[in-house]
Amino acid sequence: MFSDAVMRNESASSIRENEIYKFQFMPSDLQNIYTEILSDCTAENVFEAFSQYLVENIEPIGWKGLWIPSNDNEEFRENIGFIVKVLNVSRDLDTSVLILRQINLQEDFIDSINDFDDEFDEHHQERIVSLRELFVFSYDDRENLFHKTAFLIEIVRFFYDNIWRPWDDLDENNLNEDYLTNRVVPRLNLIYAIKNNLISERFINRYEKILVESNNTRKKMNELKEKADVQNGQEVDSNGTSTEYINEIDALEYIKLKFQLQDYQREMSIIEDSHLRNIYDTVAKSQNDDDFDDGNQNIRSLHLVSPDDFDYKSLSSTLVSLRRFLDNEKSKWPIKLCNSLTKAINCCRPGDSIFLASGSYGQTLSWIEKDIEICGIDPDVEILSNTDSGDIFWFLNVPNQIRLCNLKIKATHPLDQLILIKSGHLILENCLLDCNHLLSKDPIQLLNGAKLTEIKTKIIGQ
């Protein structure tokens, strides 16, 4: 099942006391073993495929190792590890271990293994830990009985650290695709292109940042889902039957996080594709990505938006109208042209101003978390909801203040509310909110001490 070429062990020639098995992988090694495990596998079956393979091929008991708790484990301080004896490896890849000793990972490994924390008495010794957090000792494995076990654990760890993405099992459009061909192989190629310095440093920085941020986003989604599951379990009707309940704000937050995850997925798909990688710089700059912007990030900008592309005549006319809204400071800001309000919101930084030229803007659900202002520079600027807007049209969660000025905001399909302010101060100045008799609740809702100031603003169609 395994060839000698696959199972390369860096420490085989110089095993020292208390040393762990270490492996050096070649791309072909990894591709061969992942082909064996994940052949004809879809994303939703990946965990089951690994679980089945490991249950059939590793030693479930009798070996010793080093347990290093993950960074998410707040129970232990940093640089702490534990010498453990494995009692059982379950099918879900959780492992029952007996804690033998605690060590300080910053000190010399061999010296620190002699440290013993007396607080860990018999009551605390047995724990359930993730198999991916275990490293198999080689020092007392004279006959290499657990070499294969160590190798397979490292294969799983490498996969979930480097290949698996937090959106893989949520991508409904690609759940039935060949995961090995479409995901594993391109990502392996990317990893070794980075290792061999075939990709520029700033691309690597963006790649690493996406991984960190997307994993944090998925963690927040999981926490909201767990919270909802608990709430569902606690909600019981008058007949004693459990009823589904999801906190409305948590549901909105979950949707927002899912949209963020989809944005990370789209950007990463370009990085992972060797043919698209050469245009990544252009795409990133068009989105005004902070990591690729060579300008001063403290400089504020004006985002000038039209529902259609600007031509010379319309741009000249719009600039004339814009003059009325600019003070001495803003007149010095750089101007960026956009043909989409959604894109302008995504591109702007805190403190930026968005000015809308004459026309109607079909706007999907807007999540705004930056202190900005959005102003119409002509009297006929209107922002219309559409069928993709969800139950709440504008969801505002800003640190300080957002200002909407000279706008008509109109519901064009059934909604719960036009605006929900989770935090911050919303200023509505010279605006018209047209509920169009389509709202099931009040047009504006404030939460968590949020503030609302209305100046020459009307609400109609309630």
Image: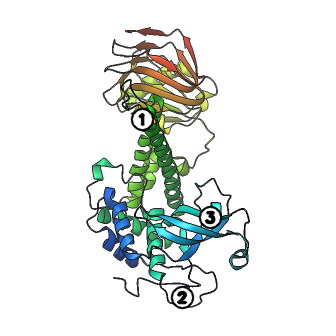
Q: Which x, y percent locates residue 308?
A: 34, 30
Q: Is residue 119 above or below residue 332?
A: below
Q: Quadrant of the N terminus?
A: bottom left
Residue beneath the point at 64% across and 54% down:
75
Give whichever of 114, 281 is nearer the camera: 114
Q: Residues within 10 Å of mark 1 (few under 14, many from 20)?
A: some
Give whichever of 442, 51 is nearer the camera: 51
Whether residue 240 is visible to the viewer of this picture, yes or no, is yes
Which numbered circle lies on residue 125?
Answer: 3
Which numbered circle lies on residue 12?
Answer: 2
Q: Is residue 329 above or below residue 201?
A: above
Q: Which x, y percent locates residue 177?
A: 26, 58
Q: Which x, y percent locates residue 371?
A: 58, 30
Q: For numbered disc 3, what is the local secondary structure? A: loop
- Do labels 3 and 1 touch, CB within 8 Å? no
Mark 1 and mark 2: Cα distance apart in space = 53 Å
For badge 3, the amino acid type reads Gln
For badge 2, the amino acid type reads Ala
Residue beneath the point at 63% across and 40% down:
298
For badge 1, the amino acid type reads Asn
Of the image marks 3 and 2, the number of the one nearer the N terminus: 2
Residue for badge 1: 232
Of the image marks 3 and 1, the number of the one nearer the N terminus: 3
Quadrant hosting residue 141:
bottom right
Give whichever of 43, 228 is nearer the camera: 228
- Do labels 3 and 2 touch, CB within 8 Å? no
Q: For numbered disc 2, what is the local secondary structure? A: loop
